[in-house]
Image (spheres, rainbow, N blue to C red):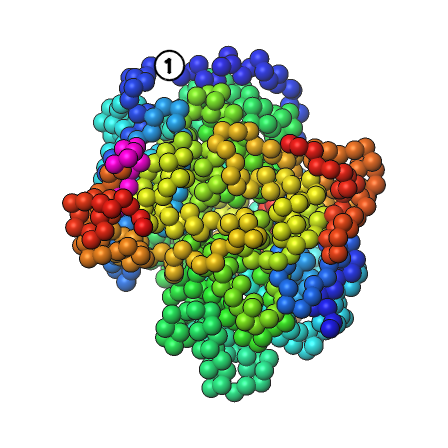
Amino acid sequence: MALAETSPVAPVQKPQGYWAGVGARLVRDPLTMICLGVVLLLILSAVFAPYLGLPDPYKGSMIARLKPLGTPGHILGTDEQGRDMFARLIYGGRLTLFIGLSPVVLAFFIGGVLGIVAGYVGGFVNTVIMRTVDVFFAFPSVLLAIAISGALGAGIVNSLVSLTIVFIPPIARVAEAVTSGVRALDYIDAARATGASALTVIRVHVIGNVLSPIFVYATSLTSVCMILAAGLSFLGIGVRPPEPEWGLMLNTLRSAIYVNPWLSALPGVMIFVTSLCLNLLSDGLRSAMNVRD
Amino acid sequence: MTKLLDIQNLSVKFSGKRNVHAINDVSLAMEQGETLALLGESGSGKSVTLKALLGLLPPKRTRIDGSMRVNGTDVLSLRGKALRKYRGGEVSMVFQEPALALDPVYTVGHQIAESVMRHKGLDKANAMSVALDMLDRVRIPSANRRLHSYPHELSGGMRQRVMIALALACRPRLLLADEPTTALDATVQIQILLLLRELQKEFGMGVIFVTHDIGVAVEISERVAVMYAGQIVEEGTTREIINDARHPYTRGLLAANLHDVARGTRLNAIPGAPPALDSAPGACSFAPRCPIALPACRAVLPPVFAPGPRRRVACLRATEPIAAE
Amino acid sequence: MSVTDVIPAADPGGPAQPLITVSGLRKYFPVRGGILGRTQAQVQAVDGVSFAVAEGETLGIVGESGCGKSTTAKLLIGLTERDAGEIVFDGEALGERLSLKDLRRGVQMVFQDSYATLNPRMTIEASVAFGAHVQGLDDPEGRARRLMDRVGLDPARFAHRYPHELSGGQRQRVNIARALAMSPRVVVLDEAVSALDKSVEAQVLNLLSDLRAEFGLTYIFISHDLNVVRYISDRILVMYLGEVVEIAPVDSIWEEQAHPYTRSLFSAMPSMDPDNRTEKPPLAGDPPNPINPPSGCRFHTRCRFASAVCKAAVPKLAGLDRNAAHMVACHLYDPASGHPDAGQGGLA
């Protein structure tokens, strides 16, 4: 029997999709929008730092050291070598944000894949992946990052690697928990009942439903990662002088705290503001990604 | 004697992202010791009525108009200690999922005894003997042993018996039962229904039994009130509702029960779905689905006909003879 | 083009043979415990279930929770792997000439929970079209639209909606359309109308009857509601603790329930008569745990007619003397069983 004759199919107007809905909800949330603005501003200014007409962040002056905030020509003063603080903070954002964000992005992909595979396949595969992950979990993240960085030696690439390794286990954990939850739902059974292969079911039905919780969790890790990266630099096993980086700057300005406390607090303020904004942003994302409201 | 229950013009409105007019101008009365089934589908307002009676609706987002009196006590005016004494003392409730309503970390005896100690001021030993007596009364075999069982060690039917024992331990005047047998198997459901019927005679309390199943209503209750879209559309004795339903919705529900429907015949299904309750009704809520609706049904609220004492039908065409279907 | 003419007319089993035959189906679920996760016990969910369904027939399966009816459904379409037994669809045995993917094209399923069975992030159209994509049928979206229209959902309004925007009845229509999108010949309906409101349930039952006639479908209809099963089915199969206790044509079983358990199950139905209410529960207590089911006839612990033989020997499913199509597994009907009341014509 033909259905086509009996049912003229009307043209379909497409309403907003999932991501458009998330965007609409985000726009209605002022706090999240402010945080997003701050983070975007930091990222943009870091990316376009060379075009902002800032003083050279590497060029110091022996006579203009530790100038206070509001000094003409140096709006945020100068550091212990007389370099312009404003320029260094902006340039510092480049490395700090890079080292703070990219390990989480890498760990999101690696940990996400590990967790989803473990959660969907289950059984022996799950045991192997998750017990391995647990071994890394046994160490506190700070200690693990320091240990790996220390073993690999100082440097930007090595701190990236060590931070990525630190963040794979928690992300894999969350991915595995969410996936095995989704795996038990009826619509996965319904999809399997169509004869779809495991890979198709994962691609079409699992990823869409586990991605947002994993993503939200990963964004909440970016602030931790930034602080850890700053900590590594502060300890001298991350970025090396004279590169501008907030953690490292905090370290080198440490001795100036008695001379000019406001000045030495500036890199800390940057770290604080950025991580706070990232945290609030991830909270906002979490509620915006919830379809059922 | 005071009426057990006297609800006058009750309206409940939830506000939030969407406003929901969950209950619209409901009046309902019960005499002492009566068993009333509140029959309706999901979203008809039957469970909201129960929650309102227990003062369980969230005060911030809920607007309640009208009055509710249980044994002469104005429920809406109760606060703090008086409300806690009323809940579980005067009125108690049996839930649909005993597995969720019982605390998993205490033995069932402990839970019953605690409620008795709180409401009746008994000491632990006496409260435990009350608990044992209650387990006996709900026909739990070897009650003495079961007193020290945890809820997860009991089967679904046993848990519901414990739930009933807990609800009746303080001898409430009114028992609210929210679909207590829906989650149970057929052979267990009938046991619980008959148990509730016996206990009702034994204790003499009034029972409001919320259900979506007309067959269950017949087994348990003397009177039935049919709810649709937050209103009572028909009320009467169970006999009247089963043998002489006047409201087209009630008649549709009876037909949909499929009792003695011949195989392969086309079902006389009520078309469509219940209305969204985002505004207070200005006309008959059932009119859009009604097979005998008149233009007037869509224009004004239906009048309430009272063909007999304590019998009412909210339908414009209730007095007409029922057409053969 | 037509939805159903995509299926080749091949019918290797021929019309004389049952469309689906199940024999000796068994599934035990291990119960793991302890630190090492060793198997400590087994839930005997389905044990030795056999039946056959003819083309165009509707078989109703009834029983209480834990009787294995849902597990049977999942075994039938291979969602749960069977421990033993044979599933023959259209003359071809699963795992021999018939692959799982082919079985799933011929046998589809509609689940109870209309919400949980739909991917919350997929539009209705995408959900309905998914199976057709997987099976490589042409124009999946077109099929999806036509089927949505057929089950009473205007594609223009619903195609791009999400499951949470629909009512329970509408979602169950989506699930039915999704099952039909594969042009199956058998649809397993696992409590498919149980979660719906009564007034909506009747609509969906009407729809299922229409679809059965229109597409020549074969249904396996699982429900705990005897009235619904009676309305939709040609034959009824009664399960208790993983076993088939009775299988018979609807009218025959409605007239006389041969197995004591079936009789209890029917007596437990609400009377619908205020002047003649049920006075005595047909059975006491809950069904036993399927982890360690009773020996012999699994119903003997609750049976009024039980004797020593019921505890010792498992009764065989056999036709009644007066009607061979009415089959029951009870020693009362087998004169050779050694039951003291056997061969006296059934239940007193």
Front-lying residue, B200 or A63:
B200
Q: Is residue C166 above or below residue B70?
A: above
Give x and y (percent) for residue A150: 38, 58
Residue at image coords 49%, 85%: B126
Give x and y (percent) for residue C295: 22, 55
Give x and y (percent) for residue B98: 49, 62
Kind of residue at badge 1: Pro
Q: Quadrant of residue C96?
A: top left
Front-lying residue, B258 or C276:
C276
Residue at image coords 25%, 58%: C40
Residue at image coords 61%, 42%: B253
Chain ID for label 1? C
Q: Is residue B191 visible?
A: yes
Give the magenta-colored segment's residue range.
C321-330
Find numbered disc 1 in the image and state the secondary structure of the residue it sits on: loop
Q: Is residue B97 above or below residue C143?
A: below
Task: Find out whether residue A112 is within the magenta segment.
Answer: no
Give x and y (percent) for residue B210: 60, 56
Residue at image coords 50%, 33%: B262
Q: Is residue A259 above or below residue C178?
A: below
